[in-house]
Image (spheres, grey):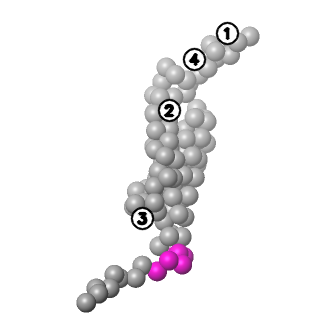
Amino acid sequence: MAATKLQAFWNHPAGPKTIHFWAPTFKWGISIANIADFAKPPEKISYPQQVAVACTGLIWSRYSLVITPRNLNLFSVNVAMAGTGLYQLSRKIRQDYFSDEKDAAPQLEA
Protein backbone atom coordinates (compact mmCIF):
# COMPACT_ATOMS: atom_id res chain seq x y z
CA MET A 1 0.00 0.00 0.00
CA ALA A 2 2.76 2.48 0.95
CA ALA A 3 4.72 1.51 -2.16
CA THR A 4 1.68 2.27 -4.32
CA LYS A 5 1.24 5.72 -2.77
CA LEU A 6 4.96 6.43 -3.06
CA GLN A 7 4.91 5.37 -6.71
CA ALA A 8 1.85 7.56 -7.37
CA PHE A 9 3.64 10.51 -5.73
CA TRP A 10 6.82 9.82 -7.70
CA ASN A 11 4.96 9.67 -11.02
CA HIS A 12 2.58 12.59 -10.34
CA PRO A 13 2.75 15.43 -12.91
CA ALA A 14 3.87 17.74 -10.09
CA GLY A 15 6.02 15.08 -8.40
CA PRO A 16 9.73 15.09 -7.55
CA LYS A 17 10.75 14.26 -11.13
CA THR A 18 9.58 17.70 -12.28
CA ILE A 19 10.39 21.35 -11.73
CA HIS A 20 6.80 21.75 -10.49
CA PHE A 21 7.90 20.04 -7.28
CA TRP A 22 11.37 21.48 -6.75
CA ALA A 23 10.67 25.17 -7.45
CA PRO A 24 8.06 25.53 -4.67
CA THR A 25 10.11 23.32 -2.38
CA PHE A 26 13.08 25.68 -2.58
CA LYS A 27 10.74 28.68 -2.39
CA TRP A 28 10.02 27.62 1.20
CA GLY A 29 13.40 29.18 2.00
CA ILE A 30 11.89 32.65 1.50
CA SER A 31 9.08 31.94 3.96
CA ILE A 32 11.47 30.41 6.47
CA ALA A 33 13.75 33.45 6.22
CA ASN A 34 10.74 35.73 6.70
CA ILE A 35 9.75 33.76 9.81
CA ALA A 36 13.29 34.11 11.13
CA ASP A 37 12.95 37.87 10.59
CA PHE A 38 10.05 37.99 13.08
CA ALA A 39 12.76 38.54 15.70
CA LYS A 40 14.05 41.65 13.89
CA PRO A 41 12.97 45.04 15.19
CA PRO A 42 10.27 46.59 12.98
CA GLU A 43 12.60 49.47 12.04
CA LYS A 44 14.67 47.03 9.98
CA ILE A 45 11.70 45.77 7.92
CA SER A 46 11.60 46.93 4.30
CA TYR A 47 8.23 48.01 2.87
CA PRO A 48 9.13 47.20 -0.77
CA GLN A 49 10.48 43.76 0.12
CA GLN A 50 7.47 42.76 2.22
CA VAL A 51 4.97 44.15 -0.31
CA ALA A 52 6.69 42.03 -2.97
CA VAL A 53 6.60 38.91 -0.75
CA ALA A 54 2.94 39.41 0.17
CA CYS A 55 1.78 40.18 -3.39
CA THR A 56 3.76 37.28 -4.82
CA GLY A 57 2.14 34.97 -2.29
CA LEU A 58 -1.37 36.24 -3.00
CA ILE A 59 -1.07 36.17 -6.80
CA TRP A 60 0.61 32.77 -7.07
CA SER A 61 -1.71 31.17 -4.50
CA ARG A 62 -4.60 31.80 -6.84
CA TYR A 63 -2.62 30.72 -9.90
CA SER A 64 -1.55 27.44 -8.29
CA LEU A 65 -5.18 26.35 -7.98
CA VAL A 66 -6.18 27.03 -11.59
CA ILE A 67 -3.22 25.44 -13.39
CA THR A 68 -3.04 21.81 -14.45
CA PRO A 69 -1.73 19.84 -12.65
CA ARG A 70 -3.05 21.42 -9.47
CA ASN A 71 0.02 22.04 -7.34
CA LEU A 72 -0.72 22.03 -3.61
CA ASN A 73 2.97 22.44 -2.73
CA LEU A 74 3.00 25.68 -4.72
CA PHE A 75 -0.28 26.74 -3.10
CA SER A 76 0.94 26.11 0.45
CA VAL A 77 4.27 27.89 0.03
CA ASN A 78 2.52 30.93 -1.46
CA VAL A 79 -0.05 31.04 1.33
CA ALA A 80 2.89 31.00 3.76
CA MET A 81 4.61 33.78 1.80
CA ALA A 82 1.47 35.92 1.78
CA GLY A 83 0.91 35.33 5.48
CA THR A 84 4.46 36.13 6.56
CA GLY A 85 4.64 39.17 4.26
CA LEU A 86 1.35 40.57 5.54
CA TYR A 87 2.40 39.94 9.14
CA GLN A 88 5.71 41.75 8.61
CA LEU A 89 3.90 44.66 6.94
CA SER A 90 1.48 44.87 9.87
CA ARG A 91 4.42 45.01 12.30
CA LYS A 92 6.06 47.80 10.28
CA ILE A 93 2.81 49.80 9.90
CA ARG A 94 2.00 49.48 13.62
CA GLN A 95 5.49 50.68 14.51
CA ASP A 96 5.52 53.57 12.00
CA TYR A 97 1.96 54.87 12.37
CA PHE A 98 0.39 53.56 15.57
CA SER A 99 3.27 53.48 18.02
CA ASP A 100 2.86 55.59 21.16
CA GLU A 101 6.59 56.11 21.32
CA LYS A 102 7.48 59.46 19.87
CA ASP A 103 11.03 59.66 18.71
CA ALA A 104 12.05 62.98 20.13
CA ALA A 105 15.09 64.57 18.63
CA PRO A 106 17.98 64.46 21.04
CA GLN A 107 18.48 67.82 22.66
CA LEU A 108 21.90 69.25 23.10
CA GLU A 109 22.72 70.32 26.62
CA ALA A 110 24.84 73.42 26.97
CB within 8 Å, label 2 to label 1: no
Work out whether mark 3 precedes mark 2 in sequence or the reverse, and give the earlier one. Answer: 2
**SS class, disc 2:** helix
The three-letter amino acid code for the residue at tag 3 is Glu
Q: CA distance from mark 3 to mark 4?
A: 45 Å
User: On the rendered image, what quadrant is the N terminus found in?
Assistant: top right
| 4 vs 2, front mark | 2
Work out whether mark 4 precedes mark 1 in sequence or the reverse, and give the earlier one. Answer: 1
Q: Residue at x 52, y 22 (%)?
A: 16
Location of residue 70 (image quadrant): top right
Q: Tell me the residue that label 3 is attached to.
A: 43
The three-letter amino acid code for the residue at tag 2 is Thr
Residue 108, position as x, y percentages in the image: 28, 85
State the extent of the magenta-drawn residues as a range. Answer: 97-102
Let me know if residue 36 appears in the view: yes
Q: Tell me the residue that label 1 is attached to.
A: 3
**SS class, disc 1:** helix
